[in-house]
Image: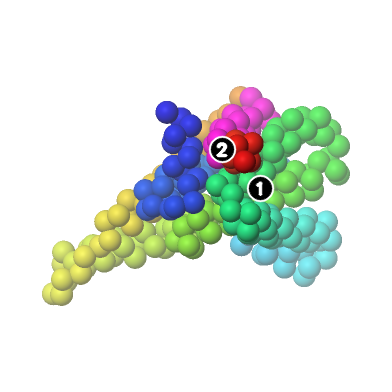
Amino acid sequence: MPTDYARRLLSIERTAEGNAHLGWMLAFIAGATNAGGFLAVQQYTSHMTGMVSAAADGLVLGQHQALLTAVGALLSFLAGAACTAVLVNFGRQHRAHSIFALPLLLEAACLLLFGLLGAWLQGLQALFIPAAVAILCFTMGLQNALITKVSRAEIRTTHVTGIVTDLGIELGRALYGRLGSEPVQANTPKLRLLGGLLLAFAVGGVLGAWAFKVLGYAATLPLAAWLAFLGAVPAWDDVDRLRAR
């Protein structure tokens, strides 16, 4: 049942399988949001390396608009990550079963806001671009902090540099194990996890770009609906428990 899967995916008691499934799903959503968002605002918003470089370039070249946009994006991502920490700690303090569901619900709301207001604000470029970048970066900060806390910093989903690096290390171990004089074994479960994250991000990027090209801003609505459903199941369980008291 989908509801049972949602409960397992966001359970307080974490398993390697649950972390992997949640990581793959969020990597897909990050890839779709990053690629689709680029078609909307001509900026990638899921990782901050480029934003820091853009801020540095804007500062040195005197391009104040680029500097402000990059700094705003960085602060929005930071605010999203901080918001996840607040929500998770709030849930733990109140012994809620929806600890990890709250950031997902907020992420769904942000994607819904972007999907509904994007077309309406598109004509107001001076307002739309900074607002859209801020919303998308905040959303990615929420998501990356969530999977970081859930997996105890073993999984990231909004950028693939670390994923590709770790994947290369494990592949190098496997290669050395076959050709080297000393027995070295690759971590097969980790290879599967990393490969799945990379594939999910890439597939999400392709489908996200295609969906935005065909549907425009409405392409974010199915992503928002899926996240809202997943988060709503454990959140509703908490509501039922409160009613039963």
Give x and y (percent) for residue 8. Answer: 44, 42
Q: State which quadrant residue 154 falls in.
A: bottom left
Q: Main secondary structure of the magenta part?
A: helix
The reply, left or right, for residue 106 in relation to residue 129 is left
> Is 218 in the magenta?
yes
* Quadrant where the N terminus is found in the figure: top left
Q: Amino acid at mark 2?
A: Asp
Callout 1: few (<14), some (14-19), or many (20+) C-alpha neighbours within 10 Å? many
The residue under label 1 is which amino acid type? Thr
Q: Is residue 110 left or right of residue 175?
A: right
Question: Residue at position x 44%, y 52% from top?
Answer: 13
What is the secondary structure assignment of the residue under circle 2?
helix
Q: Is residue 202 visible?
A: no
Which residue is label 1 attached to? 139
Q: Quadrant of residue 232?
A: top right
Distance of label 1 from label 2 (alpha carbons): 25 Å
- Foreground pick, 47 / 150: 150
N-terminal-most mark, 1 or 2: 1
> Horizontal placement of 26 versus 90: left or right?
left
Q: Is residue 147 magenta?
A: no
Rendering coords of residue 117 (x, y %): 78, 33
Q: Which residue is mark 2?
A: 237
Question: Which region of the structure is painted magenta?
Answer: 215-235
The mark lying in front, picked from 1 and 2, is 2
- Residue 177 image position (x, y, % from top left): 18, 66
